[in-house]
Image (cartoon, grey):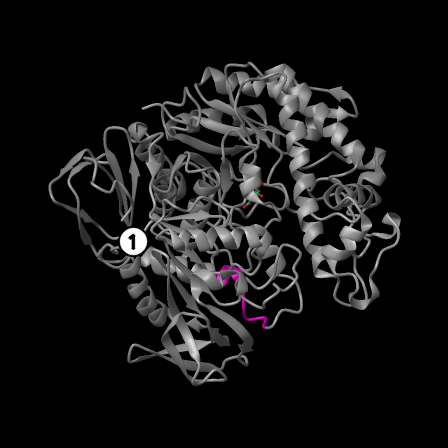
Amino acid sequence: MSSAVWPDLRSMAFGGDYNPEQWPREVWRDDVRLMREAGVNLVSIGIFSWALIEVREGEFDFSWLDEIIELLHENGIAVDLGTPTASPPAWFFANHPDARAVTADGVPLGFGSRGMASHSAPAYRDAAVRIATELAQRYGSHPAVVLWHVHNEYGVPVGEDFSDHSVREWRLWLQERYGTLDALNAAWGTAFWGQHYGEWAHVGAPATAPSVINPAQRLDFARFTDSQLRACFVAERDAIRAHSDRPITTNFMANQHNGCDLWAWAREVDIVSDDHYLWAADEEGEIGLAIAADLTRSVGGGAPWILMEHSTSAVNWQPRNVAKRRGEMARNSLSHVGRGADGILFFQWRAGRSGAEKFHSAMLPHAGETSRVFREVVDLGAKLGTLDEVLGSRVHADVAVLWDFESFWAQDLEWRPSVDVGHAERIRAFYERLWRDNITVDFALPGHDLSGYKLVIAPAQYLLSGADADNLNRYVEQGGTLVVSFFSAVVDENDAVHSGGFLAPLAPALGVTVEEHLPLREGDTGGVDFGGSTLTVDVWQEDLTLVGAETRGVYTDGPGTGGAAITRHRHGAGIGWYISTRPDADGLAAIMTEVYADAGIAPAELPTGVEAIRRRGVDADYLVAINHGTDAVSLPTSGVNLLTQDDIRGMLVLQPGDVAVVREPHTASGGGR
Ligand code: GLA
């Protein structure tokens, strides 16, 4: 079947960032030979090449780019052409010193690294559009160019900007949002600490101040920054669009908190693409990977997407950069494929000898073509080459986990009740439970149409607007099962506590409100009696007021002792659960067993360490199975393992560390396990 990623993609995209400008011509020929050996069919070029394309302001040299694009084309390797605007040249900063981004402490950011200029500086906006236009005019219909890669990872390393250009645009953005200063004063609650504004010109960016800055102002500045970065993307995209009909993307950083609301960004790109790197300190990095991949698919509405970057082995920017062991790169890649990716690319093709990233792994490491990593790259290319028919197939999920960037931005601000409460930690805890139960998950916003999901989980919905609360209440009323974790529905979109108190907007669905937060001291634990067994909890308890809910767990130890800890409420045709504390993994498993029963969800009984996801195609399903464990395992399926062409009759045996993609007849559910 043809891919929804781009119409004439016939095989899984496979390749990586390629920086030929760092190498002499003879190396280019070697690169192309080895790319062919590895089955590379797509490379991203030009991402950091501004200084070598626009050599002086307005003076362009395309000769090397012409040459490399032709060489790649002659060898059947397609090009994902970058616009190099994440790294303006030295001449840009020399000619336009006012365009430098400025930190919250008032420090203008210098040259010698990488990073864009001020997102609001007219000189930067103009220069970015100019080079995007030049590239699109020259290569927009070149047969090698199949995709545009605008910029690189918007939001890092430069996001929030406190320059004069930014402050000017910020005031305009606020005027657009609020209309009047009275409305701004009300939304920001400026009666507090005497922050009332009488002139627009007095409204500044939330730069470093003597004490904690107005959180509503901070939240709006995050929204503003996101919208300015997106405007930079849209300007480049539209400049390209005027000269090229090829799809346009920019590489996201799902799950990396770079200040971009990816739900909004996904609406602007033709194809969603993502960069993902394992956290070496996380011994089960495959779970974090799955979160990022599921989020990437979800922001794109379930459409196939491209993994634009990951690493073949170690990265270079973490405190301890752990190398991937044999087979890990393939397991990571196949997990992305299982979760909807139609392309697997890396940073980068050939390891660079100079510069800040010389200790970063690559498809072709410093050790060369006989290295373990390169041989595994060749093997991965061959594996992906068997998956043409998987292109365009989709993942189905019965469970949605709420993921709301605005809520995270607000929750992460200062002076919250406990530093031990983190949105990412709560999402990981619930997601991890679902991952271990082999239940496939989509992410969603609280305002989305959730009616297709049997179960919706809100692990960290600190900020919840009245309209979104209504949506969740309606979801339950109409038969859904909702689970809400503590410190949710606390504030509205202006970071003001809901009138009626914490959790009040969800009282219809949950039958409970929160009278007082009861955070625990560092390291303290408490207990909850849950159906006769005692769950260990920590970090947080609450004093609840029941308004219709039944008590399912009671605090037995800690400041909440004697009060309800876990509640369940029937609302209309559905059920709302509230968990007012942080249970340990076993405790959460016990609670979720009951939740699954309410939602009519059956976890798949698979051997420990096995990850199994299905993609649904037109004529068949594709079961992607990964054995992360150290023992051989068997799992029930029948069909053909596309990676080996083996017939599987009833039981797939997966050796430790092995992967399989089984073409199966459609299942009744068609969904994930
Ligand atoms: C990011 C960037 C790449 C490279 C990698 C290294 O994802 O986009 O240019 O720096 O990190 O891991």
Quadrant of the image occupied by residue 595: bottom left
Quarter of the image for the N terminus: give it: top left
Residue in the foreground of this view, choosing between 656 and 488 = 488
x and y, in percent, of residue 116 in the image: 71, 40
- The picture quadrant for ligand 1 comes to top right
Q: Is residue 590 above or below residue 437?
A: below
Q: Is residue 60 magenta?
A: no
**Residue found at the far left of this picture:** 649
Give the magenta-colored segment's residue range. 418-426
Answer few, some or many: residues within 10 Å of disc 1's Cα (few below 14, many 20 plus, some between 14 and 19). many
x and y, in percent, of residue 188 in the image: 74, 57
- Label 1 residue near ligand 1, CB within 8 Å: no
Residue in the foreground of this view, choosing between 207 and 457 = 457
Is any atom of residue 281 visible in this view? no
Quadrant of the image occupied by residue 51: top right
Residue in the foreground of this view, choosing between 202 and 505 = 505
Q: Is residue 421 magenta?
A: yes
Q: Is residue 131 above or below residue 294?
A: above
